[in-house]
Amino acid sequence: MLESIIWILLIGFFGGQIARRIRVPALVGMVLVGVVLGPNLVNAIAPEVLRAADSLRAIAVMVILMKAGLGLDREKLAQQGTVALRLGFLPAACEAIAIAFASMWLLQFDFATGLLLGCVISAESPAVIVPGMLRLKSLGWGVEKGIPDAILTGSALSDVLLLLVFSLLLAFLSQSAAAGITLPGGLSLSPLQLLPFQIMLQIGLGVLLGWFIARLLVSLLAKQNWTQTAVQDTLVAAGFALSIVVLAEKFPVFSGYLAVMTTGFFLIEMDAPLARRLRGGFDSLWAIAEIVLFVLLGASIQLNVLGNTLLVGLVVLAIGTLIGRSLGWYLSTLGSNWTWKERLFLLPGNSAKATVQAAIGAIPLAQGIKGGETILALAVLSILVSAPLGAWAIPTFAPKLLERGDVDPTKVSVSRRIVLLAAVDTSPLATQVLTKVAELARRSDAQVVVLHVLRMDDPQGIERLRHQASSILADIRYQFVTANGSVPEEIVRTAQDYGVAEIVIGKRGHRPLDEVLVGSVSQAVLESSTMPVVVVDNPS
Protein backbone atom coordinates (compact mmCIF):
# COMPACT_ATOMS: atom_id res chain seq x y z
CA MET A 1 0.00 0.00 0.00
CA LEU A 2 2.82 2.39 0.87
CA GLU A 3 4.44 1.78 -2.51
CA SER A 4 1.16 2.68 -4.23
CA ILE A 5 0.94 5.98 -2.35
CA ILE A 6 4.52 6.81 -3.37
CA TRP A 7 3.70 6.04 -7.02
CA ILE A 8 0.56 8.16 -6.89
CA LEU A 9 2.21 11.21 -5.31
CA LEU A 10 5.55 11.23 -7.14
CA ILE A 11 4.57 10.04 -10.60
CA GLY A 12 1.30 11.98 -10.39
CA PHE A 13 3.15 15.18 -9.51
CA PHE A 14 5.70 14.88 -12.30
CA GLY A 15 3.01 13.83 -14.76
CA GLY A 16 1.16 17.02 -13.91
CA GLN A 17 4.30 19.12 -14.27
CA ILE A 18 5.09 17.61 -17.68
CA ALA A 19 1.56 18.45 -18.80
CA ARG A 20 1.94 22.02 -17.51
CA ARG A 21 5.22 22.46 -19.39
CA ILE A 22 3.52 21.61 -22.66
CA ARG A 23 0.76 24.09 -21.78
CA VAL A 24 -1.87 21.51 -20.80
CA PRO A 25 -3.61 21.61 -17.38
CA ALA A 26 -1.71 19.54 -14.83
CA LEU A 27 -4.83 17.54 -13.99
CA VAL A 28 -4.80 16.01 -17.50
CA GLY A 29 -1.30 14.68 -16.89
CA MET A 30 -2.40 13.30 -13.53
CA VAL A 31 -5.37 11.50 -15.07
CA LEU A 32 -3.11 9.94 -17.71
CA VAL A 33 -0.70 8.82 -14.99
CA GLY A 34 -3.64 7.12 -13.28
CA VAL A 35 -4.54 5.32 -16.50
CA VAL A 36 -0.97 4.02 -16.78
CA LEU A 37 -0.63 3.04 -13.12
CA GLY A 38 -4.12 1.54 -12.88
CA PRO A 39 -5.44 -1.95 -13.64
CA ASN A 40 -5.64 -1.21 -17.37
CA LEU A 41 -1.86 -1.14 -17.89
CA VAL A 42 0.85 -1.39 -15.20
CA ASN A 43 -1.48 -2.28 -12.29
CA ALA A 44 0.85 -0.61 -9.79
CA ILE A 45 -1.85 0.64 -7.38
CA ALA A 46 -2.76 -1.74 -4.59
CA PRO A 47 -6.40 -2.91 -4.38
CA GLU A 48 -6.79 -1.50 -0.86
CA VAL A 49 -5.87 1.96 -2.15
CA LEU A 50 -8.47 1.68 -4.90
CA ARG A 51 -11.04 0.59 -2.32
CA ALA A 52 -10.25 3.71 -0.29
CA ALA A 53 -10.75 5.92 -3.34
CA ASP A 54 -14.21 7.14 -2.29
CA SER A 55 -12.91 8.44 1.04
CA LEU A 56 -9.93 10.10 -0.61
CA ARG A 57 -12.23 11.77 -3.15
CA ALA A 58 -14.40 13.12 -0.34
CA ILE A 59 -11.32 14.73 1.25
CA ALA A 60 -10.34 16.35 -2.05
CA VAL A 61 -13.83 17.77 -2.66
CA MET A 62 -13.90 19.13 0.91
CA VAL A 63 -10.61 20.97 0.32
CA ILE A 64 -11.66 22.58 -2.96
CA LEU A 65 -15.08 23.66 -1.62
CA MET A 66 -13.43 25.21 1.43
CA LYS A 67 -11.11 27.08 -0.95
CA ALA A 68 -14.12 28.28 -2.91
CA GLY A 69 -15.90 29.50 0.21
CA LEU A 70 -12.80 31.33 1.44
CA GLY A 71 -12.50 33.05 -1.94
CA LEU A 72 -15.95 34.68 -2.01
CA ASP A 73 -16.60 38.42 -1.61
CA ARG A 74 -19.98 39.33 -0.13
CA GLU A 75 -19.81 42.97 -1.24
CA LYS A 76 -19.29 42.05 -4.89
CA LEU A 77 -22.02 39.43 -4.68
CA ALA A 78 -24.47 41.99 -3.31
CA GLN A 79 -23.82 44.16 -6.37
CA GLN A 80 -24.99 41.32 -8.61
CA GLY A 81 -28.37 40.88 -6.93
CA THR A 82 -29.78 37.54 -8.04
CA VAL A 83 -27.29 36.89 -10.86
CA ALA A 84 -24.94 34.81 -8.71
CA LEU A 85 -27.85 32.83 -7.28
CA ARG A 86 -29.27 32.22 -10.74
CA LEU A 87 -25.83 31.13 -11.94
CA GLY A 88 -25.90 28.71 -9.04
CA PHE A 89 -28.73 26.60 -10.41
CA LEU A 90 -29.99 27.63 -13.86
CA PRO A 91 -27.00 26.72 -16.11
CA ALA A 92 -26.36 23.44 -14.30
CA ALA A 93 -30.06 22.54 -14.13
CA CYS A 94 -30.63 23.28 -17.81
CA GLU A 95 -27.53 21.33 -18.80
CA ALA A 96 -28.46 18.36 -16.59
CA ILE A 97 -31.97 18.19 -18.08
CA ALA A 98 -30.62 18.52 -21.64
CA ILE A 99 -28.14 15.70 -20.97
CA ALA A 100 -30.90 13.57 -19.45
CA PHE A 101 -33.01 13.81 -22.61
CA ALA A 102 -29.97 13.39 -24.86
CA SER A 103 -28.94 10.23 -23.00
CA MET A 104 -32.47 8.83 -23.28
CA TRP A 105 -32.19 9.30 -27.05
CA LEU A 106 -28.58 8.28 -27.62
CA LEU A 107 -27.80 5.89 -24.76
CA GLN A 108 -31.26 4.41 -24.08
CA PHE A 109 -31.15 5.50 -20.43
CA ASP A 110 -34.34 6.02 -18.47
CA PHE A 111 -34.96 9.59 -17.28
CA ALA A 112 -33.72 9.04 -13.72
CA THR A 113 -30.42 7.50 -14.90
CA GLY A 114 -30.07 10.21 -17.54
CA LEU A 115 -30.58 12.87 -14.87
CA LEU A 116 -27.97 11.12 -12.72
CA LEU A 117 -25.56 11.40 -15.65
CA GLY A 118 -26.59 15.05 -16.04
CA CYS A 119 -25.73 15.75 -12.40
CA VAL A 120 -22.27 14.24 -12.91
CA ILE A 121 -21.50 16.05 -16.17
CA SER A 122 -23.08 19.44 -15.36
CA ALA A 123 -20.99 20.16 -12.28
CA GLU A 124 -18.38 22.87 -12.83
CA SER A 125 -14.77 22.29 -11.87
CA PRO A 126 -13.44 24.12 -8.82
CA ALA A 127 -9.97 22.84 -9.79
CA VAL A 128 -10.08 24.99 -12.92
CA ILE A 129 -12.58 27.73 -12.07
CA VAL A 130 -11.50 28.64 -8.51
CA PRO A 131 -7.81 29.40 -9.28
CA GLY A 132 -8.82 30.96 -12.60
CA MET A 133 -11.32 33.37 -11.03
CA LEU A 134 -9.03 34.21 -8.10
CA ARG A 135 -6.32 35.02 -10.61
CA LEU A 136 -8.69 37.33 -12.52
CA LYS A 137 -9.60 39.06 -9.23
CA SER A 138 -5.93 39.65 -8.46
CA LEU A 139 -5.48 41.28 -11.88
CA GLY A 140 -8.70 43.30 -11.79
CA TRP A 141 -10.55 41.68 -14.71
CA GLY A 142 -14.31 42.01 -14.21
CA VAL A 143 -13.98 43.07 -10.56
CA GLU A 144 -16.04 46.27 -10.91
CA LYS A 145 -19.17 44.22 -11.64
CA GLY A 146 -18.11 41.31 -9.44
CA ILE A 147 -18.07 38.86 -12.36
CA PRO A 148 -15.36 36.53 -10.95
CA ASP A 149 -17.21 36.44 -7.61
CA ALA A 150 -20.52 35.72 -9.32
CA ILE A 151 -18.94 32.85 -11.24
CA LEU A 152 -17.21 31.55 -8.11
CA THR A 153 -20.42 31.61 -6.11
CA GLY A 154 -22.51 30.20 -8.91
CA SER A 155 -20.13 27.31 -9.55
CA ALA A 156 -19.86 26.49 -5.84
CA LEU A 157 -23.64 26.57 -5.35
CA SER A 158 -24.33 24.57 -8.49
CA ASP A 159 -21.83 21.91 -7.48
CA VAL A 160 -23.40 21.63 -4.04
CA LEU A 161 -26.91 21.38 -5.48
CA LEU A 162 -25.83 18.81 -8.08
CA LEU A 163 -24.02 16.75 -5.45
CA LEU A 164 -27.17 16.85 -3.36
CA VAL A 165 -29.48 15.79 -6.20
CA PHE A 166 -26.92 13.19 -7.28
CA SER A 167 -26.90 11.57 -3.84
CA LEU A 168 -30.70 11.49 -3.68
CA LEU A 169 -31.02 10.05 -7.19
CA LEU A 170 -28.35 7.50 -6.40
CA ALA A 171 -30.32 6.32 -3.39
CA PHE A 172 -33.48 6.22 -5.49
CA LEU A 173 -31.88 4.18 -8.30
CA SER A 174 -30.12 1.78 -5.96
CA GLN A 175 -33.51 1.20 -4.23
CA SER A 176 -32.02 2.22 -0.89
CA ALA A 177 -34.31 5.21 -0.58
CA ALA A 178 -37.26 5.14 1.72
CA ALA A 179 -40.55 3.97 0.32
CA GLY A 180 -41.94 7.44 0.73
CA ILE A 181 -44.41 8.88 3.22
CA THR A 182 -48.15 8.89 3.55
CA LEU A 183 -49.81 12.20 4.39
CA PRO A 184 -53.07 12.57 6.33
CA GLY A 185 -55.93 11.68 4.05
CA GLY A 186 -54.09 8.76 2.48
CA LEU A 187 -52.03 10.82 0.00
CA SER A 188 -48.72 9.06 -0.62
CA LEU A 189 -45.53 10.80 -1.79
CA SER A 190 -42.84 8.81 -3.61
CA PRO A 191 -39.11 9.41 -2.99
CA LEU A 192 -38.90 11.32 -6.28
CA GLN A 193 -41.77 13.59 -5.23
CA LEU A 194 -40.05 14.20 -1.90
CA LEU A 195 -36.89 15.37 -3.70
CA PRO A 196 -37.69 19.14 -3.67
CA PHE A 197 -38.48 19.07 0.06
CA GLN A 198 -35.29 17.16 0.81
CA ILE A 199 -33.28 19.69 -1.20
CA MET A 200 -34.72 22.66 0.72
CA LEU A 201 -34.14 20.94 4.06
CA GLN A 202 -30.55 20.02 3.23
CA ILE A 203 -29.74 23.52 1.99
CA GLY A 204 -31.21 25.23 5.05
CA LEU A 205 -29.51 22.93 7.55
CA GLY A 206 -26.25 23.03 5.57
CA VAL A 207 -26.08 26.84 5.72
CA LEU A 208 -26.95 26.83 9.42
CA LEU A 209 -24.28 24.26 10.24
CA GLY A 210 -21.71 26.19 8.18
CA TRP A 211 -22.43 29.32 10.22
CA PHE A 212 -22.09 27.37 13.48
CA ILE A 213 -18.76 25.76 12.51
CA ALA A 214 -17.39 29.14 11.41
CA ARG A 215 -18.32 30.64 14.80
CA LEU A 216 -16.67 27.70 16.53
CA LEU A 217 -13.46 28.02 14.50
CA VAL A 218 -13.22 31.75 15.17
CA SER A 219 -13.64 31.09 18.88
CA LEU A 220 -11.03 28.33 19.00
CA LEU A 221 -8.43 29.72 16.61
CA ALA A 222 -8.73 33.50 16.95
CA LYS A 223 -10.17 34.25 20.38
CA GLN A 224 -8.97 31.39 22.58
CA ASN A 225 -5.69 30.89 20.65
CA TRP A 226 -5.58 27.11 20.75
CA THR A 227 -3.17 27.17 17.80
CA GLN A 228 0.16 28.89 17.27
CA THR A 229 0.79 28.58 13.52
CA ALA A 230 -1.11 28.81 10.24
CA VAL A 231 -0.46 25.09 9.69
CA GLN A 232 -2.24 24.27 12.94
CA ASP A 233 -5.11 26.59 11.98
CA THR A 234 -5.52 24.74 8.70
CA LEU A 235 -5.31 21.32 10.38
CA VAL A 236 -8.10 22.17 12.82
CA ALA A 237 -10.30 23.79 10.15
CA ALA A 238 -9.82 20.84 7.78
CA GLY A 239 -10.67 18.43 10.59
CA PHE A 240 -13.94 20.20 11.31
CA ALA A 241 -14.80 20.46 7.60
CA LEU A 242 -14.16 16.78 7.02
CA SER A 243 -16.21 15.94 10.09
CA ILE A 244 -19.14 17.77 8.49
CA VAL A 245 -18.82 15.63 5.35
CA VAL A 246 -18.65 12.40 7.37
CA LEU A 247 -21.60 13.46 9.54
CA ALA A 248 -23.65 14.25 6.43
CA GLU A 249 -23.03 10.72 5.11
CA LYS A 250 -24.27 9.15 8.35
CA PHE A 251 -27.17 11.57 8.85
CA PRO A 252 -28.23 12.74 5.35
CA VAL A 253 -30.56 15.49 6.54
CA PHE A 254 -28.20 18.32 5.48
CA SER A 255 -25.72 18.99 2.70
CA GLY A 256 -22.21 18.45 4.03
CA TYR A 257 -20.61 20.03 0.98
CA LEU A 258 -22.78 23.15 1.25
CA ALA A 259 -21.92 23.38 4.95
CA VAL A 260 -18.20 23.27 4.11
CA MET A 261 -18.49 26.02 1.50
CA THR A 262 -20.57 28.27 3.73
CA THR A 263 -18.11 27.72 6.58
CA GLY A 264 -15.43 29.36 4.45
CA PHE A 265 -17.77 32.18 3.46
CA PHE A 266 -18.81 32.95 7.05
CA LEU A 267 -15.18 32.84 8.20
CA ILE A 268 -14.46 35.80 5.92
CA GLU A 269 -17.31 37.76 7.47
CA MET A 270 -16.45 36.86 11.06
CA ASP A 271 -12.63 37.06 11.03
CA ALA A 272 -10.94 38.15 7.80
CA PRO A 273 -7.33 37.69 9.10
CA LEU A 274 -8.10 34.09 10.07
CA ALA A 275 -9.71 33.48 6.66
CA ARG A 276 -6.60 34.83 4.93
CA ARG A 277 -4.34 32.45 6.87
CA LEU A 278 -6.60 29.52 6.07
CA ARG A 279 -6.59 30.37 2.35
CA GLY A 280 -2.87 29.69 2.16
CA GLY A 281 -3.20 26.53 4.21
CA PHE A 282 -5.93 25.04 2.03
CA ASP A 283 -3.93 25.97 -1.07
CA SER A 284 -1.17 23.73 0.29
CA LEU A 285 -3.61 20.93 1.08
CA TRP A 286 -5.02 21.10 -2.44
CA ALA A 287 -1.55 20.61 -3.93
CA ILE A 288 -1.62 17.09 -2.45
CA ALA A 289 -5.34 16.37 -2.72
CA GLU A 290 -5.57 17.10 -6.44
CA ILE A 291 -2.83 14.59 -7.25
CA VAL A 292 -4.60 11.81 -5.37
CA LEU A 293 -7.99 12.76 -6.80
CA PHE A 294 -7.06 12.80 -10.47
CA VAL A 295 -4.64 9.87 -10.42
CA LEU A 296 -7.29 7.66 -8.80
CA LEU A 297 -9.80 8.85 -11.38
CA GLY A 298 -7.48 7.74 -14.17
CA ALA A 299 -6.95 4.41 -12.46
CA SER A 300 -10.70 3.74 -12.41
CA ILE A 301 -11.23 4.35 -16.14
CA GLN A 302 -12.29 1.42 -18.30
CA LEU A 303 -10.55 2.16 -21.58
CA ASN A 304 -12.75 -0.12 -23.68
CA VAL A 305 -15.92 1.61 -22.49
CA LEU A 306 -14.35 5.04 -23.07
CA GLY A 307 -13.48 4.07 -26.63
CA ASN A 308 -16.93 2.67 -27.35
CA THR A 309 -18.72 5.80 -26.12
CA LEU A 310 -16.35 8.43 -27.53
CA LEU A 311 -18.43 9.78 -30.41
CA VAL A 312 -21.82 9.56 -28.72
CA GLY A 313 -20.27 11.05 -25.58
CA LEU A 314 -19.01 14.09 -27.49
CA VAL A 315 -22.51 14.61 -28.89
CA VAL A 316 -24.05 14.40 -25.41
CA LEU A 317 -21.50 16.92 -24.06
CA ALA A 318 -22.15 19.29 -26.98
CA ILE A 319 -25.92 19.15 -26.45
CA GLY A 320 -25.51 19.79 -22.73
CA THR A 321 -23.20 22.79 -23.17
CA LEU A 322 -24.41 24.45 -26.36
CA ILE A 323 -28.13 24.00 -25.74
CA GLY A 324 -28.78 23.41 -22.05
CA ARG A 325 -26.03 25.47 -20.42
CA SER A 326 -26.29 28.31 -22.94
CA LEU A 327 -30.00 28.66 -22.13
CA GLY A 328 -29.12 28.73 -18.43
CA TRP A 329 -26.50 31.45 -18.96
CA TYR A 330 -29.01 33.59 -20.85
CA LEU A 331 -31.65 33.25 -18.15
CA SER A 332 -29.11 33.86 -15.36
CA THR A 333 -27.92 37.20 -16.71
CA LEU A 334 -31.28 38.39 -18.00
CA GLY A 335 -31.94 41.91 -16.67
CA SER A 336 -28.39 42.32 -15.32
CA ASN A 337 -25.89 45.07 -16.14
CA TRP A 338 -23.58 42.62 -17.91
CA THR A 339 -22.66 43.47 -21.50
CA TRP A 340 -22.93 40.87 -24.25
CA LYS A 341 -19.14 40.38 -24.07
CA GLU A 342 -19.30 39.70 -20.34
CA ARG A 343 -22.11 37.22 -20.91
CA LEU A 344 -20.07 35.55 -23.63
CA PHE A 345 -17.22 35.12 -21.13
CA LEU A 346 -19.35 32.53 -19.32
CA LEU A 347 -18.59 30.07 -22.12
CA PRO A 348 -14.85 29.84 -21.34
CA GLY A 349 -15.19 30.91 -17.70
CA ASN A 350 -17.96 28.64 -16.50
CA SER A 351 -17.76 25.40 -18.51
CA ALA A 352 -14.74 23.41 -17.30
CA LYS A 353 -15.35 19.97 -15.82
CA ALA A 354 -12.89 18.12 -13.60
CA THR A 355 -13.10 17.97 -9.82
CA VAL A 356 -16.67 16.83 -9.18
CA GLN A 357 -16.58 14.44 -12.13
CA ALA A 358 -13.42 12.92 -10.63
CA ALA A 359 -15.05 12.71 -7.21
CA ILE A 360 -18.39 11.11 -8.13
CA GLY A 361 -18.00 9.74 -11.66
CA ALA A 362 -17.10 6.24 -10.45
CA ILE A 363 -19.72 6.02 -7.68
CA PRO A 364 -22.67 4.76 -9.82
CA LEU A 365 -20.48 1.95 -11.16
CA ALA A 366 -19.27 1.08 -7.66
CA GLN A 367 -22.89 0.87 -6.43
CA GLY A 368 -24.05 -1.29 -9.29
CA ILE A 369 -26.21 1.27 -11.10
CA LYS A 370 -27.12 0.11 -14.60
CA GLY A 371 -25.09 2.16 -17.07
CA GLY A 372 -22.51 3.06 -14.40
CA GLU A 373 -19.57 2.22 -16.66
CA THR A 374 -20.94 4.58 -19.32
CA ILE A 375 -21.44 7.35 -16.75
CA LEU A 376 -17.81 6.98 -15.64
CA ALA A 377 -16.57 7.02 -19.24
CA LEU A 378 -18.48 10.22 -20.05
CA ALA A 379 -17.28 11.82 -16.80
CA VAL A 380 -13.69 11.17 -17.84
CA LEU A 381 -14.37 12.36 -21.38
CA SER A 382 -15.82 15.63 -20.07
CA ILE A 383 -12.64 16.21 -18.06
CA LEU A 384 -10.27 15.46 -20.92
CA VAL A 385 -12.20 17.75 -23.28
CA SER A 386 -13.31 20.69 -21.15
CA ALA A 387 -10.59 21.05 -18.48
CA PRO A 388 -7.75 21.88 -20.92
CA LEU A 389 -10.03 24.21 -22.88
CA GLY A 390 -11.23 25.98 -19.73
CA ALA A 391 -7.76 26.40 -18.22
CA TRP A 392 -6.54 27.91 -21.49
CA ALA A 393 -9.64 29.98 -22.30
CA ILE A 394 -10.10 31.80 -18.95
CA PRO A 395 -6.84 33.82 -19.07
CA THR A 396 -6.99 34.08 -22.85
CA PHE A 397 -10.47 35.58 -23.23
CA ALA A 398 -10.72 37.60 -20.00
CA PRO A 399 -8.69 40.55 -21.44
CA LYS A 400 -10.82 40.45 -24.59
CA LEU A 401 -14.27 40.21 -22.99
CA LEU A 402 -13.98 41.80 -19.52
CA GLU A 403 -13.14 45.29 -18.31
CA ARG A 404 -10.21 45.84 -15.97
CA GLY A 405 -10.83 47.61 -12.67
CA ASP A 406 -9.03 48.42 -9.44
CA VAL A 407 -8.12 45.53 -7.16
CA ASP A 408 -8.84 45.49 -3.44
CA PRO A 409 -5.71 43.79 -2.08
CA THR A 410 -7.52 42.72 1.10
CA LYS A 411 -9.95 40.59 -0.89
CA VAL A 412 -7.54 38.50 -2.97
CA SER A 413 -4.87 35.96 -2.19
CA VAL A 414 -2.76 34.59 -5.01
CA SER A 415 0.30 32.44 -4.49
CA ARG A 416 3.32 33.82 -6.32
CA ARG A 417 7.08 33.76 -6.13
CA ILE A 418 8.37 36.52 -3.82
CA VAL A 419 11.63 38.25 -4.81
CA LEU A 420 13.53 40.80 -2.70
CA LEU A 421 16.25 43.15 -3.95
CA ALA A 422 19.27 43.98 -1.80
CA ALA A 423 21.17 47.02 -3.13
CA VAL A 424 24.71 46.91 -1.73
CA ASP A 425 28.03 48.69 -2.14
CA THR A 426 31.51 47.76 -0.97
CA SER A 427 31.20 49.46 2.42
CA PRO A 428 30.72 47.66 5.77
CA LEU A 429 27.05 48.64 5.54
CA ALA A 430 26.59 45.84 2.98
CA THR A 431 26.68 43.28 5.80
CA GLN A 432 23.74 44.94 7.53
CA VAL A 433 21.76 45.15 4.28
CA LEU A 434 22.38 41.48 3.49
CA THR A 435 21.50 40.47 7.04
CA LYS A 436 18.23 42.39 6.85
CA VAL A 437 17.22 40.96 3.48
CA ALA A 438 18.06 37.46 4.72
CA GLU A 439 15.74 37.98 7.69
CA LEU A 440 12.91 39.12 5.42
CA ALA A 441 13.50 36.29 2.94
CA ARG A 442 13.32 33.61 5.61
CA ARG A 443 9.99 34.96 6.85
CA SER A 444 8.33 34.67 3.45
CA ASP A 445 10.42 31.94 1.76
CA ALA A 446 11.53 34.55 -0.78
CA GLN A 447 14.33 34.67 -3.32
CA VAL A 448 16.88 37.48 -3.27
CA VAL A 449 18.58 39.52 -5.97
CA VAL A 450 21.80 41.12 -4.70
CA LEU A 451 22.57 44.20 -6.83
CA HIS A 452 25.83 46.10 -6.91
CA VAL A 453 25.99 49.20 -9.13
CA LEU A 454 29.54 49.63 -10.42
CA ARG A 455 30.96 53.09 -9.75
CA MET A 456 34.69 52.31 -9.85
CA ASP A 457 37.00 49.48 -10.82
CA ASP A 458 37.20 47.48 -7.59
CA PRO A 459 37.40 43.72 -8.33
CA GLN A 460 38.54 42.93 -4.80
CA GLY A 461 35.57 44.77 -3.32
CA ILE A 462 33.16 42.94 -5.62
CA GLU A 463 34.70 39.58 -4.73
CA ARG A 464 34.35 40.47 -1.04
CA LEU A 465 30.66 41.27 -1.64
CA ARG A 466 30.16 37.92 -3.38
CA HIS A 467 31.71 36.12 -0.42
CA GLN A 468 29.51 38.03 2.05
CA ALA A 469 26.38 37.20 0.06
CA SER A 470 27.36 33.55 -0.13
CA SER A 471 27.90 33.41 3.63
CA ILE A 472 24.87 35.41 4.85
CA LEU A 473 22.43 34.00 2.25
CA ALA A 474 23.71 30.43 2.45
CA ASP A 475 20.22 28.93 3.02
CA ILE A 476 18.41 31.30 0.62
CA ARG A 477 18.09 31.07 -3.15
CA TYR A 478 19.76 34.21 -4.53
CA GLN A 479 21.67 35.63 -7.47
CA PHE A 480 24.37 38.31 -7.57
CA VAL A 481 24.10 40.88 -10.37
CA THR A 482 26.01 44.01 -11.29
CA ALA A 483 24.98 47.03 -13.33
CA ASN A 484 26.45 50.27 -14.69
CA GLY A 485 24.81 53.67 -14.57
CA SER A 486 23.05 56.00 -12.17
CA VAL A 487 22.69 54.18 -8.86
CA PRO A 488 19.04 55.11 -8.07
CA GLU A 489 17.91 54.47 -11.64
CA GLU A 490 19.64 51.10 -11.83
CA ILE A 491 18.16 50.01 -8.50
CA VAL A 492 14.61 50.86 -9.58
CA ARG A 493 15.08 49.41 -13.06
CA THR A 494 16.48 46.13 -11.75
CA ALA A 495 13.65 45.90 -9.23
CA GLN A 496 11.13 46.29 -12.03
CA ASP A 497 12.91 43.79 -14.29
CA TYR A 498 12.88 41.10 -11.61
CA GLY A 499 9.39 41.94 -10.31
CA VAL A 500 10.60 42.32 -6.73
CA ALA A 501 8.25 42.77 -3.81
CA GLU A 502 10.57 44.98 -1.70
CA ILE A 503 13.88 46.83 -2.03
CA VAL A 504 16.36 46.78 0.85
CA ILE A 505 18.94 49.56 0.72
CA GLY A 506 21.49 51.09 3.08
CA LYS A 507 21.85 54.69 4.23
CA ARG A 508 25.20 55.92 5.46
CA GLY A 509 26.11 58.29 8.22
CA HIS A 510 29.07 60.55 7.32
CA ARG A 511 31.49 58.71 5.02
CA PRO A 512 33.28 59.57 1.75
CA LEU A 513 30.93 59.90 -1.20
CA ASP A 514 32.51 57.13 -3.25
CA GLU A 515 32.44 54.45 -0.52
CA VAL A 516 28.76 53.93 0.19
CA LEU A 517 25.25 54.40 -1.09
CA VAL A 518 24.78 57.89 0.25
CA GLY A 519 21.63 59.25 1.82
CA SER A 520 20.70 61.04 -1.40
CA VAL A 521 20.66 57.68 -3.20
CA SER A 522 18.30 56.04 -0.73
CA GLN A 523 16.13 59.16 -0.79
CA ALA A 524 15.99 59.08 -4.60
CA VAL A 525 14.98 55.42 -4.56
CA LEU A 526 12.27 56.14 -1.98
CA GLU A 527 10.87 58.90 -4.17
CA SER A 528 10.97 57.04 -7.50
CA SER A 529 10.15 53.45 -6.54
CA THR A 530 6.60 52.11 -6.75
CA MET A 531 7.66 49.18 -4.57
CA PRO A 532 8.15 49.26 -0.79
CA VAL A 533 11.67 50.27 0.25
CA VAL A 534 13.34 49.16 3.49
CA VAL A 535 16.16 51.53 4.51
CA VAL A 536 18.88 50.14 6.79
CA ASP A 537 20.65 52.89 8.75
CA ASN A 538 24.30 52.77 9.70
CA PRO A 539 24.27 52.43 13.52
CA SER A 540 27.63 54.22 13.89
Image: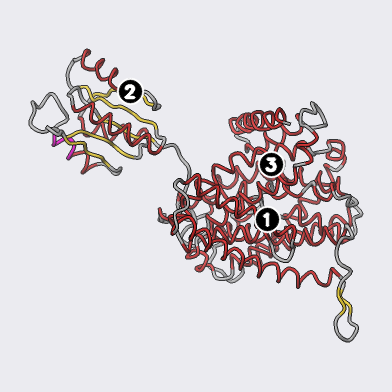
The numbered dot on residue 154 is none
Secondary structure of the residue carrying tag 2 is strand
Distance from Cα at disc 3 to Cα at disc 1: 17 Å
Left or right: 287 in relation to 222: right
Q: Residues within 10 Å of mark 1 (few under 14, many from 20)?
A: many
Q: Position of residue 28 (x, y in %)?
A: 68, 37
Which quarter of the figure is the C terminus placed in? Answer: top left
Please say if 260 is above or below 493: below
Residue drawn at x 35%, y 33% is: 497
Q: Amino acid at mark 2?
A: Phe
Residue 15 occupies quadrant: top right
Q: Secondary structure at mark 1?
A: helix
What residue is drawn where x is 70% and y is 50%?
356
Say which quarter of the image contains residue 45: top right
Q: Quadrant of the N terminus?
A: top right
Quickly name the residue at label 1: 245
Q: Which residue is mark 2?
A: 480
Q: Nearer the viewer, mark 3 or mark 1?
A: 1
